[in-house]
């Protein structure tokens, strides 16, 4: 039975082998922060983390979450990725 469950989980479980949930979340948050601050330097230290964590828990990539975050706050950025 264990082997069947391991096969069913496949690559999705192997991808994070040896990495804790807290480490995955911290890595995601760091990437999200880097993307948002690169676009809008004025947001450095001013990110609404409950909203960011909502994007994390709903399965957004850091890039997609940063896009949604900026759109929801009516922040515009140019083609070069900066405000």
Image (spheres, helix red, strand yellow):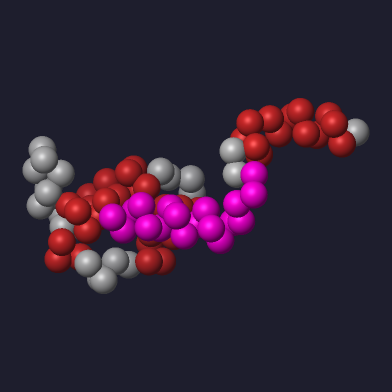
Residue 20, how many percent across, how many down?
61, 56
Q: Main secondary structure of the magenta part?
A: helix
Residue visible at 60% across and 44% down?
16
In magenta segment, residue 33: yes
Residue 14 position (above or below residue 42): above
Q: From which residue to which does the magenta span run?
A: 17-34
Residue 69, how many percent across, how many down?
29, 54
In front of the other: 70 or 21: 21
Q: Would you identify the image quadrant in which residue 29 lies?
A: bottom left
Q: Would you identify the image quadrant in which residue 60 lies?
A: top left
Residue 37, how many percent across, how many down?
22, 58
Residue 66 position (above or below residue 53): above
Residue 32, how many percent across, how many down?
34, 53
Q: Is residue 29 left or right of residue 46?
A: right
Q: Can residue 68 be seen?
A: no
In front of the other: 26 or 18: 18
Residue visible at 49% across and 49% down?
58
In magenta segment, residue 82: no
Residue at the far bottom in the pictured view:
45
Residue visible at 41% across and 43% down?
61
Residue visible at 14% across and 66% down?
42
């Amino acid at each position: 039975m264990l082997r069947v469950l391991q096969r069913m989980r496949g690559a999705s479980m192997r991808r994070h082998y040896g990495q804790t949930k807290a480490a995955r979340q911290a890595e995601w948050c760091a990437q999200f922060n880097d993307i948002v601050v690169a676009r809008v330097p004025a947001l450095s230290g001013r990110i609404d983390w409950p909203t960011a964590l909502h994007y994390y828990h709903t399965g957004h990539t850091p890039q997609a979450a940063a896009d949604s975050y900026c759109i929801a706050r009516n922040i515009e950025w140019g083609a070069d990725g900066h405000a």
